[in-house]
Amino acid sequence: MAADTGSSSLQLPCVFSPKSRQYLALCAQDGRLRIWNTDSKTLHQEYVPSAHLSATCICIAWGPCRTVKDGPQRKKRKSEAGQAAEKADLLAMGTAAGSVLIYSTAKGALHCTLDGGHSGGVNCVQWHPEDSLLYSASDDTNIIEWDLQTGKARSKWKADRAAVTSLCVSPDGKLLLSAGLIIKMWDLDTKEVYRKFTGHSTAVTTLRFATTRPPDSNGLYFLSGAAHDRLLSVWQVREDGKDKNSVVSFTLTDEPLHVDLVASNSKEEAVRLAVVCKDGQLHLFEHFLNGPCKKPLSPSCTVQMSDTKDSPVPIPLLAAALGAGMQTVLLSYGNHLQPVMEKVEINTAERHVCLTRDVQTSLSLSIETAVSKVKTPVVNAKGRVLVPGLPGHQESITKDINNEQNPLDNMSIAERLREIDLSTVSTDKGALKGTASLQTDNFAVLLVQGLESSDTNILNKVFQTRKEIVIKKTVARLPIPAVLPLVEEVSLFVNHCFCIPLKAVLMVRWLKAVLMHHTSYLASLPDLVTQLGVLYHMIESRVKMFHKLTKLHGKLYLLMTQVGVPTNTVTDVDHTAKLVYEEEALFL
């Protein structure tokens, strides 16, 4: 399960809400939490943690469904008292800084912050099924039991010699599974170890209880998965304590990243599994847990996705949730920035199923989603209204009570380019008030259009901007898919315009703004060095050339200081110039 993924895995957190599966929560490369509505296929909410670049989100977990008050409601009758619907509300996020953030979807804001407990990154968070308790595991080898009513740590204990990478609370809330390399079962009343299980050679990233039966009946089973391991192991908690080895193994094609499980309530009921692997495939299992099974079990059905091109390209699956029947599965696929959600019917009679979908991945500044709970303020004629949405995805407009149309609204690209005349833009008090100039949003729109079409004319006009604040705001409003193309274009411009100092300085300002705002996303790219090869080559060549240029500068300074100097002062000037040259050489 993504929520259980520790620091040993590079998988980004991705998890469906419990019961109704109405929401999908993801943390993408830019450090933002996005909650998508699986029914309407739209972005429901977005939250940007204050430290999303320095303290990225490592794991997320939905809390138990509860009754939520969305706003003022009328007093209900006695007959309606027990009909309140429970919804998924609270969402826990563990960060690399050691804090735990609790986000409320009902409020659309941060509910509380649990900090001061861990000294290392939080690898896993798990909710208690009944009480308002939360458990967190960290690189500092400790487990903390948090009380959400007080926002403070209720209990803390050392769980392992190394980092604790995964947790799971039993359905009855009495037992807790924790794992690094060794799996331990804890009694939550006494905080003492109940059982130990060994068998994984790498860090355990997945722990799930497979049955709801008590441990004293030999019917309690749980499964585990580890990093770089292509097996899911099932363990039986026996009454006699003879449970050192796993009893069942499920074979996979790659490391498990997301596991959805329908637990078994009796021996006559099979456990159902949906496992999404690192290679983007989905494996479905169905098995009756009743003692050991010597041979590893293969999936009853394997699902892959690809596009509709002549040469099909695989589409990675991000998460999967089982429906009421084995054939109904809710899928999330594509990328974490804008995933696609779809409920499909799978013919499990076939061992291998390939689904073809047309997934469009292109740069865009507009997103047709309705962000919930947006209030429209009352403004006067001179006020400016910003359209809600993702930063940089909408242009700023001017509210006009008389319904007069803004002349910038219907401008073509050519007309906008003519308006970008930096020599006429002035911040002096004496500047004409009626002078029209494009705002930061217009620059962001033109920049993305230039990157999409590779139009040098548009890019040249935008890159002529000299105001550093405009450059910073334009880069901040860019969508994530446009960041890497911008870095490549800026690198090429710097390489070609280095002989022109002014243009080179402007390009360096653009590159500086990109690194300031989007370092977290760039650092998450696996092949960053190859994609930014031009920039690395340029920096290396300039650094090598800088040493020679500095030496030449010192020699020219020696010559220039002796031109036009009287004979009696040549000796003093020559001595001074020699000292300057020696200092520059020593600095290098």
Image (cartoon, rainbow, N blue to C red):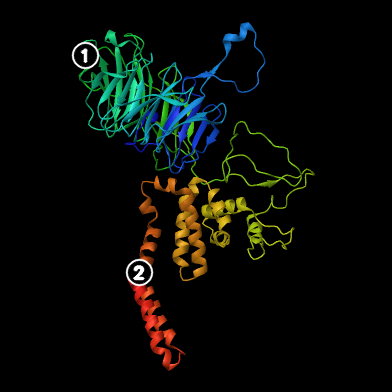
**Sequence-first tag of 1 and 2:** 1
Q: Are marks 1 and 2 in contact (CB under 8 Å)?
A: no
Q: Which residue is label 1 attached to? A: 241
Q: Give the SS element for disc 1.
A: loop
Residue 233's spot in the image, x, y percent? 26, 23
Furthest-bottom residue in this view: 567
Residue 199's spot in the image, x, y percent? 22, 26
Mark nearer the viewer, 1 or 2: 2
* Quadrant position of the N terminus in the picture: top left
Residue 383's spot in the image, x, y percent? 72, 45
What amino acid is labelled 2 in the image?
Phe
Q: Say which residue appears at 40% left-offset and 19% top-offset.
A: 326
What's the CA distance linking mark 1 and mark 2?
A: 70 Å
Question: Residue 587 got which mark?
Answer: 2
Q: Give the SS element for disc 2.
A: helix
Q: Which of the two residues, 482 or 213, is positioned nearer the viewer here? A: 213
